[in-house]
Image (cartoon, helix red, strand yellow):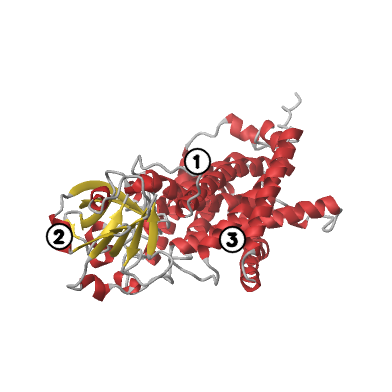
Amino acid sequence: MKTSPLRGTAVTARVGMALGIAIAICFITGLISHFIQHPQPWFYWPTRPVWLYRVTQGLHVISGIAAIPLIVVKLWSVWPKLFERPIIGGITKQLERASILVLVASMFFQLTTGLLNIAQWYAFEFFFTTSHYAMSWVAIGAVLVHIAVKLPVIRRALGEPLEGDVAMGGAVGPSRRTVLWSTGLAVGLATVVTAGQTVPWFRKLSLLAPRSGEGPQGIPVNRSALAAGVIRRAQSADYRLTVTNGPTTKAFTVAELAALPQATHELPIACVEGWSASAEWSGVVLADLIATVGAGPDSDVRMISLEPPGPYSRTTLPARHAGDSQTLIALKLNGEVLELDHGYPCRLIAPTRPGVLQTKWLARIEVIPA
Amino acid sequence: MTAVRILLLAAGLAGGLYGAWLLWQFPLEIIVRIAVWAGAGVVLHDFVFAPLCAAFGFAGRRIIRGRWWTPVTVAALCTAVLGLLAIPVYARPGARPDNLTVLDRNYPLGLWVSIAIVWACVPICYLIARLLPVGQNEVVEQQRSDDVERQPPAS
């Protein structure tokens, strides 16, 4: 079988560059999300603009999905090299092949686990977040090594004209330019059919997005009250929200919370899984609430859910976010009392935070001494 | 360029080794599962997906001629991408009865409609390509260097 003249370095280098950009965006936005969830002293994450995490995490999933057609075309363009002779070759060739194996395997791992995770299909029997994070370093490392090895080839390929003069055979047919624009088309298509879960304009077109963006009170749900096992306690007449600061403790009924001064803010809820939606949240400003137990604006605050102990049943809100004027203990969503699945009786909603850390069904708020 | 290459190589090795060290923290059983998942992808691509694409290309090229070929290959690429994206949603394997906001679309309909739209564009592209005048550049670009026009008849 004759290899298509369209396959070749001219296409590989150009598609590879686009893929490199997609991977870089995906890696950086992924790191941001990781460090928000695993805070480091050197990591600064602002509270403005309020949609910042919505954009970074939306980009994480969009760039990951965009990488799928890019990697398909890039591998297509180099696939015949797999069978190039000598198959074994020298030590240099073996090292290069090994590095490419690591690159392709780690990229495949990242894209498939990511794609399955946004559809909540846990077909793999390992923990997603930790393995996806560890493998992201392997993947980015392999990408950098690959660029280092191929840099002279890439430079030569980009310096030469796209269409080889004699390489093209036959009559009118696809040119390398056609390969490039059709790759772009496939990337655009992949984006449009999925990005509607975070970009409202595409909502109707995103036929393959795991979320339509609809849900009770206009917002999707990630963890239901049933799954969290909180239905009885959340609806109990004995429910109290306990707020503590060292020895000072106050308990509020839902009616008492509603009687406190209320604020309303338009804030997005942005899930780590790449969907997001903006909504109007009303409730008590957290800074005002913790002021009732004498806490200042410089303390981190622990949020504890009615949910039995689990990875996200208690989260820590950094002082910067805890003291922000738009951070609410929300009682209402889009003008209605919160539905159970949205965190009734009350939940945290703060700017620029991943949805998984916007603790629902709050039972207790603890001010951590600064 | 050598300095840039050394820098990239060093950064790449450092990143990769850090990732390998992170993976090493998992129990052996999990490491094996992760490796199998990653390796299976390479095998599936290199020895199933890629040969199938090559076979389709080889056969298709012989059946579909002329101006039809370009739009057909573009539509095939788009179909493959739509198919890959549909895998985790088509049969809604991640759906749970307690949360109707996940996987809340009709994905079979969505997939087939989007594929139908893609293929409906094929005849349109064909017609546009036929009706538009073919530029001289395009003709020349697609000729071999040994394409020499016939000599005028000797008088």
Q: Please state the chain letter of the residue tagged with numbered disc 3 in the rendered image.
A: A
- Residue under the image location 21 percent in, 61 percent down: A338
User: The residue under label 3 is which amino acid type?
Assistant: Phe
Do we see residue B122 in this rendering? no
**Do callouts 3 and 2 point to residues on the same chain?**
yes
Residue A362 falls in image quadrant: bottom left
Residue B6 falls in image quadrant: top right
Picture quarter with the C terminus of chain B = top right
Question: Pointer 2: what residue?
Answer: A256
Question: Pointer 3: what residue?
Answer: A109
- Closer to us: mark 3 or mark 2? 2
Picture quarter with the N terminus of chain B = top right
- Residue under the image location 45 percent in, 54 percent down: A37
User: The residue under label 2 is which amino acid type?
Assistant: Glu
Do we see residue A349 in this rendering? yes
Secondary structure type for disc 2 = helix
Residue B91 falls in image quadrant: bottom left
Instruction: Measure how far apart labels 3 and 2 are at the Cα level.
Output: 50 Å
Question: Pointer 1: what residue?
Answer: B129
Residue B108 on image: x %, y %:
40, 66
Q: Please state the chain letter of the residue tagged with numbered disc 2 in the rendered image.
A: A
Residue A327 on image: x %, y %:
29, 48
Residue B81 on image: x %, y %:
51, 56
Pick the residue in front: A106 or A29.
Answer: A29
